[in-house]
Image (cartoon, rainbow, N blue to C red):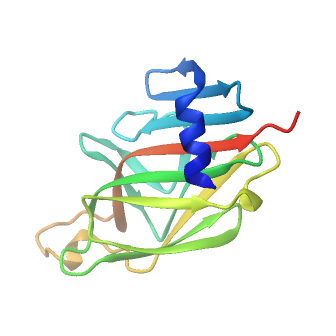
C-alpha cells in the first residue's frame, strides 16, 4: 500500500514548496486524491529547521546526539503513512554497532543497530502520529559514551551516540472527500 501511494503521489501531482534556509517542505496535491509531503532538515546548519533537544551544536558533518536520549519534533500530513530517513554520518563506538530504540509520541516503534555512515529508515505507523500530524521522535541510546572511552586522549565530556547529517520525512495519505 505504501509503495502504491508513493508511486501515485510522484506520478500525478503538482507541488507547492515552502523553503527556509535550513529546511524544505513540499506538499504535493494530486487529482487522484493522494496527498504527499516531503520535508528535509539539514543538521549541518545552525538551525536544522525543526525543534530538537539532546543534540550538540552543528559541525561541518552534522550534529551529535548528546546524552542517553535525543528528540526531534517533525510534522507530517495527519493520518499519513510516514517514513523518516535518518542520514547517520558517524557513531561514537568504533568497534561495535550503536544500538538504539525509537519512540514516536511516547510509543516504542523500532529498535536499530547501525555502524555509522549509513541510512536508517523509520516507518511511523499512522496510529502513532499526533492528530495534527505531529511526530515527536525520541532516540534512546543503549551504548552512548564519552569519546574518552575509546580514545583516552580525547577529553570531550559529552556522552555521544550518533551524528546526524540530515533527516527527511516522506508521507502520504488518501483524501476522503
**Front residue of this view, candidates 36 and 50:** 36
**Quarter of the picture holding the N terminus:** bottom right
**Looking at the picture, how far across and down is residue 36, in whole percent?**
63, 35
**Looking at the picture, how far across and down is residue 102, in whole percent?**
55, 68
In the displayed structure, 16 sits above or below 105; it is above
Residue 118 located left or right of residue 3: left
Q: Quadrant of residue 5?
A: top right
**Front residue of this view, candidates 21 and 27:** 27
Residue at the left extreme, as displayed: 153
Q: Is residue 73 visible?
A: no
User: Which residue sits at x=14%, y=74%?
Assistant: 151
In the displayed structure, 9 sits above or below 144; it is above
**Looking at the picture, how far across and down is residue 67, in whole percent?**
45, 66
In the displayed structure, 169 sits above or below 9; it is below
**Front residue of this view, candidates 36 and 105:** 36
User: Which residue sits at x=59%, y=37%?
Assistant: 8
Amino acid at each position: 500500500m505504501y509503495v502504491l501511494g508513493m508511486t501515485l503521489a510522484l506520478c500525478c501531482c503538482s507541488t507547492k514548496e515552502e523553503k527556509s534556509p535550513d529546511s524544505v517542505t513540499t506538499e504535493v496535491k494530486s487529482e487522484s486524491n493522494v496527498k504527499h509531503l516531503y520535508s528535509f532538515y539539514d543538521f549541518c546548519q545552525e538551525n536544522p529547521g525543526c525543534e530538537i533537544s539532546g543534540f550538540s551544536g552543528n559541525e561541518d558533518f552534522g550534529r551529535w546526539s548528546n546524552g542517553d536520549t535525543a528528540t526531534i519534533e517533525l510534522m507530517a500530513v495527519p493520518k499519513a503513512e510516514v517514513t523518516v530517513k535518518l542520514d547517520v554520518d558517524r557513531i561514537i563506538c568504533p568497534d561495535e554497532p550503536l544500538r538504539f530504540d525509537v519512540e514516536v509520541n511516547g510509543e516504542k516503534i523500532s529498535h536499530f543497530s547501525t555502524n555509522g555512515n549509513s541510512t536508517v529508515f523509520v516507518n511511523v505507523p499512522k496510529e502513532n502520529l499526533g492528530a495534527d500530524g505531529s511526530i515527536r521522535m525520541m532516540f534512546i541510546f543503549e551504548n552512548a559514551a564519552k569519546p574518552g572511552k575509546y580514545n583516552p586522549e580525547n577529553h570531550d565530556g559529552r556522552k555521544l551516540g550518533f551524528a546526524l547529517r540530515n533527516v527527511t520525512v516522506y508521507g502520504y495519505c488518501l483524501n476522503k472527500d
